[in-house]
Amino acid sequence: MNRELPIYLPIKVILLILIQAFIFSKMALFGFISPMIYIILLYIYPTHKNRSLWITWGFLFGLCLDILLDTLALHATVLVFMAYLRPKVMRVIFGLNFEQKSFRIQQAPIAQRYAFIATAVFLHHLVYFGLEAFSWSKWMLVLEKTFTTGLFSFIFSLLLITLLSPKKK
Amino acid sequence: MQRIIDFFLGNKLRLLFWFYLLIGIGLTTSQNLYFKSSYLNTSGQISGGIHLFFSGIGDYFSLAAENKFLSEQNKVLLERLTALEKPGLNQNPAELKKNFEYINGRILKNSFTGIDNYLTLSLGKKDSVFTDMGVVNEKGLLGIIEFSGNSFSTVQSILHSKSKINVKVKGTDYFGSLIWDGKKPNRVQLTDIPDLAPIKKGDTIISGGMSSIFPENILIGTVEDFELTAAKNYYLIQVRLFNDMQNIGPVYVIKNRFKKEIKAVENNSDE
């Protein structure tokens, strides 16, 4: 009945950090692709909560990953950016439904949900690799990495969401 | 005053966003070496312990492979030893003392899919491992220590956009710089080799020994492909690494016994 007890969220978040740092970041598909699946935080975090708190959580979550992966503050910066942008992206994709207080992303039509994850993955990877390269001259490399890594992040994110989401009765 | 307070309250979210974003970008792109090293050191000390725990679990699964690898390496070393022990060679221990000393350790965290890759090493200042020492394994060169903490260090991999290592083509005296274009983790680029050099596919690339970090003749890779650059005076050579950067195994830090003296001499000549 009470499927969304608040205690579940911190456990999911810690699991997400560990899975990302110790499984997916150590993966190398085709020798050079490490999917970034922690982006599903944007999917599992409730939508109509305090937004300042949400941005702060995004920053702290990213910083935990950065400390584990030696990436200075790359993940933190990108997550703050994505956390700020999330409502705007959602408004575009879910339309008027999103304005309602009762809106829950898990109940949206499947096509809209996939579109949201794909958009989030694309924006996240573009900013991430752009910031990592930090030079306009490497734009080809940034795009290449965004699309190749993004494709696999998308596929693995979908799989994980299916695993993590509560069973339908 | 009231207006200022209203402004801050009204734009709370936006201000918070910019605040975090600027901290993040500042931390990520900081060029201040002191700040960067102390930050990476602190994070390295925290994450080093966690990685040590997880790699401790993972190590059990690779024991068989590691044993095989070590026995093969032993065989190679024994063969070299017997070759060295041939009668007639000078075996005065004082003369056998080499410039370079090796300290063995292992990699706790490896990365190779980013544009700037770092490795976390299980050695630190307490094992007398310091900044600017070279890191190699049996198959070749891996990187240079960028920051060393008390018990862990961060290694700048050769797969890093700022990595630049002095190398040469084996059997010639043509020196060049080894860089990485950020694409494939098993392929690096060699630049600054003049068009006069007799390059062919399959040539071996080894370390040049022009710096005090690496000794000469450490293996790096083979020439896979090459072309003249736009200026037509130099080659751009694609080098396939001997090392599998995804599977590194035991590593060795190279300590130059005469580094201080070399540095002192270089500083004197600069003046």
Image: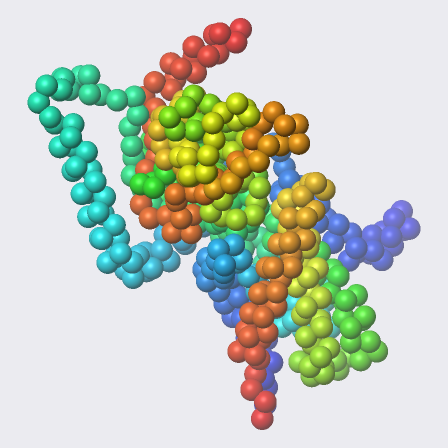
Where is residue B72 drawn, in percent x and y? Answer: 21, 47
Outermost residue, bottom side? A169
Colouring of the image: rainbow
Q: Quadrant of residue A58?
A: bottom right
Residue at left 28%, top 28%? Answer: B101
| Residue A114 or residue A161, whichever sits in front | A114
Q: Residue at x 39, y 17 (%)?
A: B260
Residue at 68%, 61% in the rendered image: A122
| Residue B96 appears in the figure | yes
Is residue A11 placed above or below B165 in the rendered structure? Answer: below
Q: Position of residue B57 (x, y in %)?
A: 32, 60
Question: How many dots with numbers?
Answer: 0
Q: Is residue A80 above or below residue B260?
A: below
Q: Residue furthest right?
A: B3
Tell me residue B233's x, y (percent): 61, 25
Residue B49 visible to the viewer:
no
Q: Find the residue positioned furthest to the left.
A: B87
Left or right: residue B4 compared with residue B122: right
Closer to the camera in the image, B73 or B39: B73
Left or right of B52: which side holds B76? left
The answer to which of B195 and A138 lies nearer the viewer is B195
Note whether A110 is above or below B55 in the view shown: below
Residue drawn at the location 58% of the way across and 93% of the way down: A169
> Which image quadrant for residue A126?
bottom right
Pick whichever, B264 or B11, lies toward us: B264
Left or right of B186? Residue B60 is: left
Whether residue B231 is situated above or below residue A32 in the rendered picture? above
Q: Position of residue A81 (x, y in %)?
A: 71, 56
